[in-house]
Image (cartoon, rainbow, N blue to C red):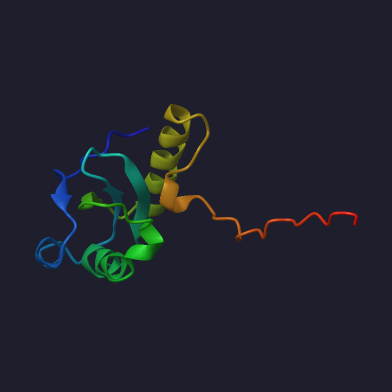
Amino acid sequence: MTPTLFSGWKPLGPAEITILPESPGVFEIATLVRNVLFIGTATESLSTTLASHLATPGMLHARAGRLYFRYAATEEAERLQSELLAQYRERHAGNLPTAQTPTSPLQRPQRHLKAV
């Protein structure tokens, strides 16, 4: 596994996203205390991909407080994402980051009928 040269953590906001490179790469989105919520790839443009995540905060399971991101520009974004997800799973008992965990549909509570 190759070491990843990530940028420093930055607040996830429009000002920071506009200065990102228009190149492919991998990124992580995390909470203030750096609990990683999402590990993603940008196959064409880091700035465009992160702007779309900023526009749809529900998919990140946004918590109270600000979100942060870091990135690494690379042509091998998908391979690097796979490595990062594998490392994450090793450290977290096989679990994926919370925003990458498929959510199950809400189940209706079962009602038990009383015999009258």
Q: Nearer the viewer, residue 4 or 94?
A: 94
Q: Position of residue 71 (x, y in %)?
A: 23, 50
Left or right: where does residue 103 sit relative to residue 55?
Answer: right
- Residue 7, quarter of picture: top left
Does residue 76 lie above or below 14 as drawn? above
Q: Nearer the viewer, residue 74 or 31?
A: 31
Q: Is residue 83 above or below residue 47?
A: above
Residue at position x 38%, y 56% from top? 61
- 83 in relation to 43, above or below: above
- Total label count? 0
Question: Which residue is pictured at 41% across the width and 53% down the height?
Answer: 78
Counting from the top left corner in percent of width and height, residue 74 is at 27, 52
Check the image and name the residue furthest to the right.
115
The C terminus lies in quadrant:
bottom right
Q: Is residue 29 left or right of residue 115?
A: left
**In the picture, which quadrant includes the N terminus?**
top left
Q: Nearer the viewer, residue 114 or 28?
A: 114
- Residue shown at 43%/41% (left/top)? 85
- Nearest to the observer: residue 71 or residue 65: 65
In the image, residue 34 above or below residue 45: above
